[in-house]
Amino acid sequence: MSVAKIVTDFRTNVNFAGDGEVDLFRKLAEAIVRNSKSLFVGETHSATKYNVSFDLTTGVKTRCEIADLLIVSKSVQFPFLRATFWQAKKQKTSKWVSLKSSDQHIDFSGQFNQWDLLSRRPAVCRHFAILSTKRPLK
């Protein structure tokens, strides 16, 4: 997989000013399918369709979508599969370019429960049956 090819393809096909968050991650998924040997790229976003429940670090039980994209790839060097969940967020003003906060953290518009789920990877209970596929598992 060439990350540079994926990025070039993605940037060629997007309009950052006009495309919404869903359009952007769909175009990213298409670029991944065209420029990688990923076995599976599927959308996992929805208000309730791909929800999981889990306990937050605060101890509160919560429920949210697992991510926007699921990408499954196979290692050529070792016999294992890797699942990657990507969560997309679009902001009108980039917070990644200028770090102006007093404690030097990056402000990020997102839900705490999604951040906690994807950064900490706690045990989850699924609330969905199957995933739609862009490229089926082989």
Image (spheres, grey):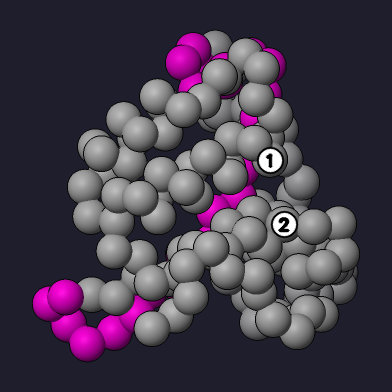
For mark 2, what is the residue? 45
For mark 1, what is the residue? 22
Is 96 one of the magenta-colored residues? Answer: yes
Residue at position x 58%, y 57% in the image:
69
> Most extreme residue toward the bottom, as rendered?
79
Residue at position x 46%, y 16% in the image:
97
SS at mark 1? helix
Q: Which residues are magenta?
A: 76-99
| Residue 135 relative to residue 5: left or right | right
Q: Quadrant of residue 58?
A: bottom right
Predominant secondary structure in magenta? loop
Report x, y in % for residue 91: 67, 24
Of mark 2 and mark 1, the one earlier in the sequence is 1
Quarter of the rendering occupied by the C terminus: bottom left
Report x, y in % for residue 136: 48, 75
Is 34 one of the magenta-colored residues? Answer: no
Report x, y in % for residue 13: 46, 28
From this view, report whether residue 132 is shown above or below residue 128: above
Which of 102/66 is in front? Answer: 66
| Residue 80 relative to residue 20: left or right | left
Residue 80's disc is none
Is the residue under label 1 in contact with that under label 2 (CB below 8 Å)? yes
Mark 1: amino acid: Val
Which of 16/125 is in front? Answer: 16
